[in-house]
Image (cartoon, helix red, strand yellow):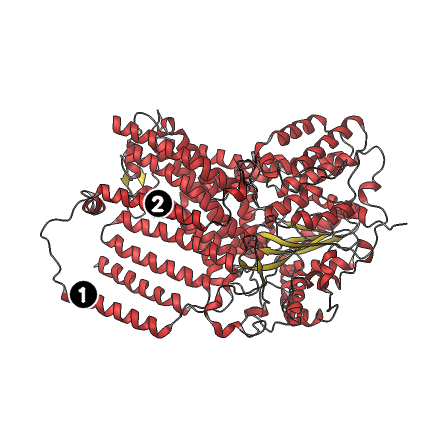
Amino acid sequence: MWAQIAFWVCAVGSVVTGVAVFRVDSMARATFALLASFVFAAGTVLLLNLAYLGILVVLMMIMEMVVMVVFMIMYMMNPAGLMPMTMVHNQKGSLAIAGGVFAALVAGIFLIPWPTSGDPRPADPTRALGEALMGSKMLVMMVLGLCLFATMVATVVLATHRGRYDRYGDRLDAKHPDDPVRGGLNR
Amino acid sequence: MVEQLPFWGGLVLPVVLVSLVAAAAAWDSALASRASGGPASALVAPFHAVAGLLVQQRRRTLAADLLLWRGGALALVGAGVLASLVTPLGRWVVADFSIGIVWFNAMEVVAWAAVWLVGWGANSAYGLIGGYRFVALGLAYELPHMFALITTALGAESLRVGDVVAAQDAVWFVVWMPVAFVVYLLSVLAMAFWGPFGQAVAADLAGGAAAELSGVDRLLFEAGRWLLLVSGAAFAVPLFLGGGSGPLLPDWLWSLLKTLAVLASLVWVRRWVPTVRMERYQEIAWIVLIPLTLLQALVVALVVLAR
Amino acid sequence: MDLTSWLLRRTPVRPLIAATPGGAGARLAAEREARIRGWRLALSPAEATMLIVAGPQDESMAAAVETVWRQMPFPRSRAEFAEAADVVTALAEAEARLRSAEHQRREAARGGDAQHGSHHQDASGSPEHAHHGSGEAGGGQSAPPSHHEHMYAPPEDHDRGHRPHDEHAHHDHDSEDMREQHDHHADEHPGDHTALEHDHGGHMQHGGHAGHDMGGMEMPGDIPMADRAPDRDGLQLDRLTVQLGPILPAWPDGLVVRVALQGDVIQEAAVETNGSQDVAEPFWQSLEDGVPRDAARRLDSCYRLLTVAGWEQAADTAARMRDLVLAGERISAEFHRWARRVRRSRILRWSLSGLGEIDWVDSPATGDALDRLTRWIDDAEAELGSGEPVPDEDPARILEALPELLIGTEFAGARLIVASLDPDLERARVAHG
């Protein structure tokens, strides 16, 4: 019973705050409505006894939203988020896409013959999930992880405005880098 | 080893935390008064401060985002209390989650959002910069902090706090994970933006994120900050200091004494070091602390594999 | 007996000290008195329960003092005194008023309307705003574009009423009414509640808004917009205009710096000094012979720099020793202990080095912030030892160099630079001739 109530609270809460993202008129409120939506979604994950994943969603989403906020401040020095703004662009197109995806997913729920299992639930579903995902594919996952990491580093290197030649001179022989703000190591 | 209390445990927890906060605040006030040559009555000063904030008018600033501003202060208090749900006092714990360490980390990250909201919501440039500094601080301390937490979980081969305590039966983790311990203490100071990491509410910013708070809102914000410091200090005990283990005294008393010792030294640090500027700490955190904590984790992993 | 008065009697006094030009002596007395009574100084009007206006009446400060006063929540009280000798009675009376429930209720009933805090809100049409908006709109519009070359106004021809327009002119590239809004803005919060200007860099998506003037409509509270300008990485980002001083913790008495901030990086800075009249004799020079006044002044500077650097303990010790020196007591043992600790602090060295570097030959201000702090300690040590006074840098020269030093630094760095120079503005205001 309680699980049912909790599920519906999380489900409705997640949708309502998700809608709020596009209804509020301040960037800060939109960000935090989105965060609330993710936290509710994490609640449903917790109901599946996937405690680790659920808490991790909360943890990562808070950090992500706050990092997003840094960019907000960068582009809009707008304390208290006062400027009216809208999160809705290309209304018709996005409505069509959203409606289509929703219809497809709902159809999927009813049309696909979902497998059922008579096995008892594993003691630690997170571990079971992890083993199912990675047990036989560990090598693939590790290579994938390295590739992702290398991609991130490469993107940053390509995007950066100032490279080492800007910092240490054309011959890389400057003793201290020429930075707008000095770091803590006095390099 | 660790047993979960019935529902009233959740009601006792805030009382215990608030008592620790009161003790820490009185200690801080006494230290401050000794340096400035103020009166000896400083021990009660924090209580007077609470009385003053209770009677003080709640301020509003022009065009503030009240919902987010005040919500931020509340979230800070919530984070401080919820983080301690998984901290055992001796044998008792309010909630014995299987992922206790991750829970603590997630609750403590709520402070990121909370401080930023308090700074941003007031519609003040100083508050904004204060919130901004806290996010910068968060980006600096969080990764080394996570690696420090993971190191203890690795040593115990479990994310459950009770298992971490049990794993220290023979040797406390502080002995063979000193780097993780030091980094953990640094990040406790940082997550409570206390002492050397107090730039978010620093004097140079006229109080920074807290610059526009008054009355109950300031009380909540300050309380939340102290609660985070206390929660962080208390969590160091099961993680690194063997939980409630110790000779003669009952285990809950040992937990309490160790917590008070960690707390007292964290409070005292503020007297001895100036504020660290964010742009300087950022580089230290990423270039020195992250590799150090990774090395520490590697050492622990090898030990765990070998035994 | 009701709860309110019970709580009021326990309310701690948190003074915010506003020193008027020529009020250095009164400020020191207020700081000493607050310290002895265990009153922790407030960092902002919101935290303060008492406003201490130290020094002679000066109309240039009136607006700032009023704004700060308006921003302070109840309960609050105000102490004003011109002479250091009056400090004890003035503070005692103010404390009594603060703790009197009857007085606070009367004040709240009377002055509630003017209070920035409680009642008026979300008010695009609040009287306060309307007043500021129209009241300051008249003066000094057409500043020539080249004017920003001379941002530092020498104190002689300084006229605060009209300066702001000139100072702002160079980054007001938009329109006439933008400029008005800037000023309205700056005048509305001359104290340390910094006012904000708004733009909306990220709203390119709704093109419909781009063209029209957002200054009035839809902007809650009529808050004007910020400019946009390229930042140091070449991006077009918003920026805020913020006025630092004259009422700010650990800030040189009477200094006002207007800065344009992007994030917390200072893009532009203009320095002015506050004060409508000349000072007959600067406080630090007026001290009688025999008092090691340069040592006391250096300790005062150290107190402020250490406060800004966030080292409360060392700052408090410096303030206490300053007061002892001024009272004619000997402090050598304690001074040496303190000096050793400050000199040895690695974190302090690490935070101060490389900030605000000056390469003047043979000047007490040469070097970076750390060099200056070290020199202050050395100077104080020398004078306490031998009684030999030590020279100080000309404040006018510091003020002239200040904008250049501040531009490009982050807020924390800028505050440290100002504190490490600590110009004695009373000296700059002595009548020439």
Q: Mark 2 lies on which chain?
A: A
Residue B178 at x, y percent in the picture: 40, 29
First reached walking from the N terminus: tag 1 or tag 2:
1
Label 1 sits on a secondary structure element that is helix
Q: How far apart are marks 1 and 2 (CA)?
A: 34 Å
Q: Residues within 10 Å of mark 1 (few under 14, many from 20)?
A: few
Observer-nearest residue: B92 or C21?
C21
Outermost residue, right side: C433
**Labelled disc at residue C156:** none
Q: Is the C-beta separation of discs 1 and 2 under 8 Å?
A: no
The answer to whether one can see residue A132 in this image is yes
Outermost residue, front side: A171
Q: Mark 1 lies on which chain?
A: A
Residue name at image x 79 percent, y 48 percent: C426
According to the picture, the residue beneath numbered tag 1 turns out to be A108
Give the left or right position of residue C420, taking residue C3 as reference: right
Q: How crowded is mark 2: few (under 14 residues within 10 Å), some or many (20 or more)?
A: few
Reply above or below: B269 against C73: above
The answer to whether one can see residue B256 in this image is no
Residue C107 at x, y percent in the picture: 65, 63
Residue name at image x 36 percent, y 53 percent: A61
Residue A153 at x, y percent in the picture: 39, 45
Reply above or below: C41 against C387: below
Residue A73 at x, y percent in the picture: 50, 57
Look at label 1 and name its amino acid: Gly
According to the picture, the residue beneath numbered tag 2 turns out to be A149
